[in-house]
Amino acid sequence: MSIRGDIEREVISDFLREKVGSFEMKPSVYRYGTVQSTRDTVIQIRGLTGCHYGEILQFDNDVYGLALDLSEDSIGAVLINMDASVTAGSLVRGTDRVADVCVGDTVLGRVVDPFGRPLDGELLSTVETRELEQRAPAIIDRVPVNRPLETGILAIDSMIPIGRGQRELIIGDRQTGKTTIALSTIRNQKRDDVICIYCAIGQKAANTARIVHELTESGHMENTIVVASFANDSPATQYLTPFAGCAIAESFMYDGHDVLIVYDDLSKHAVTYRTMSLLLQRPAGREAYPGDIFYLHSRLLERSAQLSPDLGGGSMTALPIVETVAGDISSYIPTNIISITDGQIYLSSELFFAGMRPAINLGLSVSRIGSSAQHGAIKWIGGRLRLALSQYREIAVFSQFGSEVDAATSKQIHRGERMQEVLKQSHEETYSVSEEAVLLLALAHGVFYDMELSEIGQAKLDLLDYLGTVHRGSLHAIEATGELNTEENETLKQAMDAFMEEYTHGGK
Amino acid sequence: MSTHVKYVLKVAPPYDDDLVRRIEDGFTGLLGFKVQFEVTEDPALLCGFVAYVRGVVYDVSGKTQLAGIQEHLMDSMIVPPSVIKEEDDDS
């Protein structure tokens, strides 16, 4: 044996001796119960007195469960990790712990499961944890929503504005761009240092992997945390996913940060909760959902808030997603969540397949509190634009039947088509506040009204390029203040006239 | 016939009746009611015993203590991220 080997052996044995010496021998005392029956992932337990709601229970072979039903003679629990080794007669151990998740800066940029275990293949060392179930901030802890959260999507920021601390539902049939809107919003937050949390609830692993890959490739994963459960995970794991994301978001909010959280999606979450409840033999209500399904989502979404300056002034903005079937927003879960949230963005299949992206149905979309947080530079035209577009879409339906229209209506249709074209936006492009203000000003000034529809997409980009070069100062001023004063308004209008002159005569 | 409930006691071998009686006396004194055990031998415990009394497990087995030492050593090995960062900065 070499001298180095001897020294290493000595160091290791000294280390072990010291650590073993510092170990305090004490009896392990804990409550236990016995498994009475198992049904799918739901376990009925006898004994285990003193068990509390949401307590983590430990079975043999490192299998864990969650106590959800407490009655006089038995406890109903759901298994967190599916395992066939739990059988009638198995022992269950109470842990005196409720489910928690790791929080803090070390989780930023990571993909974790609802218990904070990393899913991205790298070690996660963290010392700070937070319980999944928390009380929502009290009234006294909150202040009104008064700061905008820019999505970078012109149609939303101008007509359905979202404020920091707001809950805005994204609702629509499958394949209408709901997740795309949420991801575009996440991508736009890097400008403002908003921390983003994406909760994938019971999604296909491939879809979540694609989203993580996209965010990583575009450099937006740095300020994002993905909390994921997959379709093959136990109902308990899927059920806890949004609560875990919310706990992580809360910890940042109470540290004074602005946080955006996306729940994708709460209709799957409701189905998971229904599965668990039916297996726990709870009474079934409408559409077989349990009676507390409303409370499940309201207690989750109520945790979003704009905190008062005394508590650091942080905020948590929630974008829950709900999937409808055949456009039916009057079914149970959509109506519940519509009534809980502060507005909804309704995406329509018809608009989506007609090429309107994002496919926002303005008639059914609303933001109840966002307008008070909207930038002045955008607000002044947002209301008028919404009205004009709604009128256009109503008229457009009749014009499809080939009925003859008068000159005024024809002009309205002509303008409406161009407005709609300006609002089209690919999922990869997001606009800054100044760019949005400029495009809205251009619409109000009629810049695009004489163009062919096919030219507008390129003309928008050219206009932004032109003004970004020629009037950079004005754009910076709008970006800094969020306002568009009369002087800048006039300057930009003149610049737009010059652009139009060049555009029409310059052969572009 | 005894009217007392018999609780479960798992003991690692070797053991004798005197040891069981001393454990029973200890629990009777600790819990304030008469405790009698039905004894099962469990070599997997290595040493010591595990008692199941009124929904509570009292585990003083060698197996559990070794698991505790393992956990204690594992915890000692985890270096907080701040320390790793400091070491990287130094190098």
Image: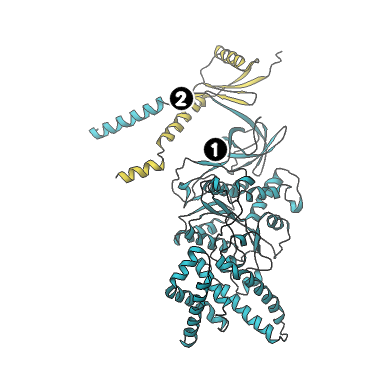
Chain colours: A cyan, B yellow
Residue behind mark 2: A24
**Lower position in the chain sequence, tag 1 or tag 2:** 2
Residue A323 in the image, given as x and y percentages of width and height: 65, 60
Which of the pair A489/B48 is nearer the observer?
A: A489
Query: In the rendered structure, are the residues bearing label 1 and label 2 in contact, judged by CB atoms less than 8 Å apart?
Result: no
Q: Is residue A369 left or right of residue A466?
A: right
SS class of the residue under badge 1?
helix
Which of the pair A239/A1 is nearer the observer?
A: A239
Q: Is residue A486 visible?
A: yes
Q: Is residue A428 visible?
A: no
Q: Which mark is residue B60?
A: none
Q: Determine which quarter of the picture holds residue B28.
A: top right
SS class of the residue under badge 2?
loop
Tell which subunit mark 1 falls on. Answer: A
Q: At x 73% / y 60%, what residue is drawn?
A: A330
Q: Is residue A112 above or below residue A404?
A: above
Q: At x 64% / y 52%, what residue is drawn?
A: A269
